[in-house]
Amino acid sequence: MIVMRAGVVAFLAPSLVLLTIFVLIPLGWVIRISFNENVGGAYMRSAWVLDNYIQFLGSTWYLVNTLWYTVYIAFFATVLSALLAYPVALYIARSTGFQKSILMTLVLSPLLIGLVTLVYGWIVIFRGGGILNSLLIGLGVYDEPAQYMWNIKGVVILLVYIGMPYMTMSLLDSIERINPFLAEAARNVGANRWTTFWKITFPLTMPGLYAGLVIVFTLNFAAFAVPLMVGPDETRMIGLLIYKEALINNNLPFASSISVIMIAASSVTIIGLGYLFNKMILNKLEAKK
């Protein structure tokens, strides 16, 4: 038993060391800095005060226009990613051979490109005479070019695009674990495709959906490069606020406190989402068994 435990510790030691160096120590530093005082014309003063947290949490403007606004945008983009990823994942799961490999490569292709390069590519698409506006005008959707650059619509589109690979692969893993005879049995008793999806596929893909929601929501909630490069000047997403306070206003204590609040808010949202899935969906599946 002792030898087995020693083997487990030896196996986990490199990962624990890397986790400590690159996650725990920087996080501890951010938390410590958040209690310092910002000094005008200077870097900061070492202290143990709650002024930075009070400045954010005590302000209705920050709570509504930054924290809640970021949760809303992140959640909205995450739900859109899930709705768009489901049919893609279902189609890939039913494909085989070379076709499936090509489809998976296309889904994962956004992850092969650097984020800044990816955003610049979408800037070309978003501009007034770009591909998107030309296509929509040609289809009769718009009479004149719509504004996607420096607009929250462009931010949401890009967040959905970036989140699609994570959501699709999470759903695909769950879909491929479903016994295909279940859907066949449902069709044999008269169920149509929608009923089969809602009664069989959807409940059995809940683990993959939850994993995708967690990953994509976390990425969207902390996003700052996309709002910075595509969003309007007054974009109030929390990741961008941290960036501006740290690198433009040189207020590291306030930026650090917002970072801690962002991590806490994201964690609470994810825990609440897990509780919702467990109580409202997974428990019903257990009851049916």
Image (cartoon, rainbow, N blue to C red):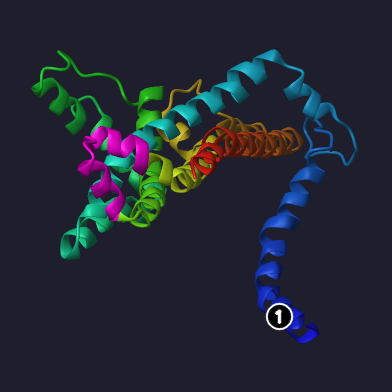
Whether residue 30 is visible to the viewer of this picture, yes or no, is: yes
Q: Main secondary structure of the magenta part?
A: helix
Q: Give the residue at the far right of this rendering.
A: 48
Query: Which residue occupies 22% across, 42% down?
Result: 187
Q: Is residue 97 left or right of residue 284?
A: left
**Relative to the observer, which residue lies in front, 171 or 57?**
171
Please identify the quarter of the rendering in which residue 128 is found. top left
Q: Is residue 133 left or right of residue 209?
A: left
**Residue 173 location (% of width, % of height):** 39, 55
Q: Which residues are magenta?
A: 180-201
226 or 251: nearer the viewer: 226
Residue 188 lies within the magenta run = yes
Q: Which quadrant holds the N terminus?
A: bottom right
Above or below residue 236? Residue 202 is below
Residue at left offset 53%, top offset 41%: 282
Name, please, the residue furthest toward the front. Answer: 189
Residue 252 belongs to magenta span: no
Residue in the foreground of this view, choosing between 39 and 192: 192
| Front residue (pair 69, 124) | 69
Which residue is denoted by mark 1 in the rendering? 10
Q: Residue furthest bottom?
A: 3
- The residue that appears at 77% across and 22% down in the rendered structure is 55
> How many marks on residues?
1
Q: Secondary structure at mark 1?
A: helix
